């Protein structure tokens, strides 16, 4: 067995390899507006195993531009009363990561105590 260099030792903690993630610079340059969110479970019990998950769909609906009530009623009749959502992203998230997202958002918005 070879000896580890000091640099290699910095990545080990109790026999486990430790690394950090790094987001690239400018990651928010391509951010898109989103105002629609839809969650679909994978059929597992919500309080079930950590490997269960959910689908998180993110989209946007722009406000329709109508010149008046008559034009609005025509558009509503033409679309059957629906406005299509423009998909922005579709994600499958494990239950554990969904809980982590909930905690991070809740703490950031001041709705949950910041767990540091």
Image (cartoon, grey):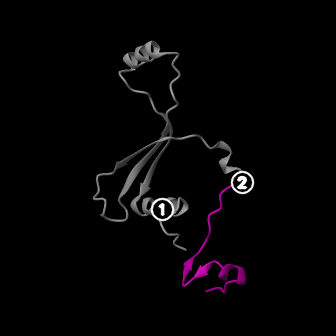
Q: Which mark is residue 25?
A: 2
Who's the residue at 37% across and 65% down the image? 50
- Residue 14 belongs to magenta span: yes
Magenta part of the chain:
1-24
Query: How much space separates mark 1 and mark 2, taking CA atoms?
Result: 29 Å
Element type where label 1 sits in the image:
loop
- Residue 39 belongs to magenta span: no
Number of disc labels? 2
Image vertical order of residue 13 relative to residue 84, above or below: below
Who's the residue at 59% across and 74% down the image? 18
The image quadrant of residue 76 is top left
Other residues around mark 2 within 10 Å, as few (<14) / some (14–19) / many (≥20) = few
Give whichever of 80, 98 is nearer the camera: 80
Name the residue carrying label 1.
111
Residue 63 at what x, y percent from top left?
A: 51, 29
Give the mark toward the camera: 1 or 2.
Answer: 1
- Relative placement, left or right, of 96 versus 18 is left
Element type where label 2 sits in the image:
loop
Residue 65 at what x, y percent from top left?
A: 53, 22
Residue 64 at what x, y percent from top left?
A: 50, 25
- Relative placement, left or right, of 81 versus 6 is left
* Magenta part, dominant SS: loop
Q: Quadrant of the C terminus?
A: bottom right
Who's the residue at 43% across and 62% down the image? 99
Q: Which mark is residue 72?
A: none
- The disc, 1 or 2, on the residue closer to the chain's N-terminal end is 2
Q: From this viewpoint, which residue is outermost toward the front? A: 69
């Amino acid at each position: 067995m070879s000896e580890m260099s000091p640099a290699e030792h910095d990545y080990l903690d109790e026999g486990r390899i430790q690394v950090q993630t790094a987001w690239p610079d400018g990651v928010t340059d391509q951010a898109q507006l989103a105002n629609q969110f839809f969650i679909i479970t994978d059929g597992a019990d919500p309080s079930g195993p950590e490997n269960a998950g959910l689908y998180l769909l993110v989209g946007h609906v722009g406000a329709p531009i109508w010149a008046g009530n008559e034009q609005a009623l025509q558009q509503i009749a033409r679309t059957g009363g629906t406005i299509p959502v423009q998909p922005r992203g579709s994600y499958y998230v494990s239950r554990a990561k969904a809980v982590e997202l909930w905690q991070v958002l809740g703490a950031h918005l001041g709705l949950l105590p910041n767990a540091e």
